[in-house]
Amino acid sequence: MKKKIVSALLTATMVCGMSVVPAVGVAAADDTITVGFSQVGAESDWRTANTESMKSTFSEENGYELIFDDAQQKQENQLTAIRNFIQQEVDYILLAPVTETGWDTVLQEAKDADISVIIVARMVDVSDDSLYTTWIGTDSLLEGRKAAEWLNAYTTAKGIDAKDVNIVDIQGTIGSTAQIGRSKGLEEGVDNYGWNLLAQQSGEFTQAKGQEVMESILKQSGDDIDVVYCENDNEAFGAIDAIEAAGYEVGGEEGQILVMSFDTTNAGLTDTLSGKITLDTECNPLHGPRVQEIIEKLEAGEEVDKQAYVDEEMFAADDTVTSIKVDDADYEVTTITQDIIDGRAY
């Protein structure tokens, strides 16, 4: 352990956006594990749930001291945060990267300091994968492929010719793992089935930008749009607002604009239940307990897998499609109900 004793008088210190919350009234215990977490930001409901999962897991009660930094969507803030973590001699660094590239130098610094780095949610593209210990998160490309296969099955069941399917892709933050995978999954579907991809533009994973992008595209191609493929729920909320404000209807019926989304937040699934979102593909944000399991293995001197994907579901507004196949694997499509929404943790 590199853990340092923290002053009993210090209850919370703010340094470059970081919050440090040690025990109140006593010195930090020698066996406390210090974790520095650089979070990409708070751009979406998914990200908020992800942050809360980390904060509740890496708590004082669980034997941790968490140093949390909100990067506000800026890589330079994350680079600064990681270097601050290194200076503070944390035991582990958790990184949810803004984009995949640009990490080699700072991760080498962490490796030189003998600090294990765990990449969370989004991936990093580095020249040497020994610069990080492990990655845990979702398979965004599989998510995109699953959504594309559902769209093919849905339009086929409705008797809609592929050449009549006109799609708008509201992408996530360009260069992020989720954007790369979900965009590619759709693009493969376009190539495989002959759909028309009318537009691709980033909504930056936010509701405001999703609405702005949708408003712009509607002015150019409103009457031609059949499907809006939003790369997260918040973009879908904004797109739906723009579609309805422009006088169009959303839903899966003829003459309406079909909205697809990712994340399956509570609000996203509520819109799926109402029929505003026709398909919502899950991206589970509750990574805290899974990261804790990895840290416990590392503390025990055990080996961990380089990558750990999580299982995720698909939820639809109706039962037109009940299952799809991707790479010879079958995936169930669940018709959403209020009971399902009420029973979920986020």
Image (cartoon, grey):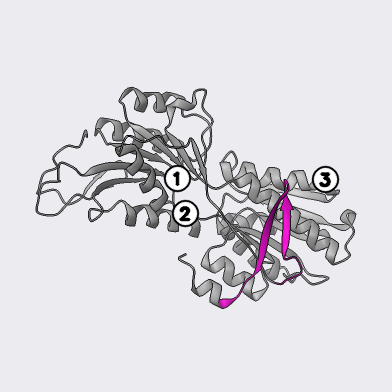
Q: Position of residue 75 (x, y in %)?
A: 45, 36
**What residue is pinned by disc 2?**
47
**What residue is pinned by disc 1?**
40
Q: Is residue 18 left or right of residue 144?
A: left
**C-alpha separation, residue under disc 3 versus residue under disc 1:** 34 Å
Q: Position of residue 243 (x, y in %)?
A: 70, 66
Three-letter amino acid code of the residue under disc 3: Asn
Is the residue under label 1 in contact with that under label 3 (CB below 8 Å)?
A: no
Is the residue under label 2 in contact with that under label 1 (CB below 8 Å)?
A: yes
Residue at (51, 27) in percent of width and height: 126
Dot 1, crowdedness within 10 Å: few (<14), some or many (≥20)? many
Query: From what the image shows, is residue 255 above or below residue 108?
Result: below
Q: Is residue 29 left or right of residue 71?
A: left
Q: Position of residue 346 (x, y in %)?
A: 47, 64
What residue range appears in magenta? 318-338
**What residue is pinned by disc 3?**
192
Disc number lying in front (2 or 3): 3
Residue at (68, 73) in percent of width and height: 275
> Which part of the image, by quadrant, shows the N terminus?
top left
Q: Position of residue 187 (x, y in %)?
A: 75, 44
The secondary structure type at the circle numbered 1 is loop
Query: From what the image shows, is residue 280 above or below residue 192?
Result: below
In magenta segment, residue 324: yes
Q: How many marks?
A: 3
Q: Is residue 341 left or right of residue 56?
A: right
Residue at (54, 68) in percent of width and height: 267
The earlier-in-sequence mark between 2 and 3 is 2
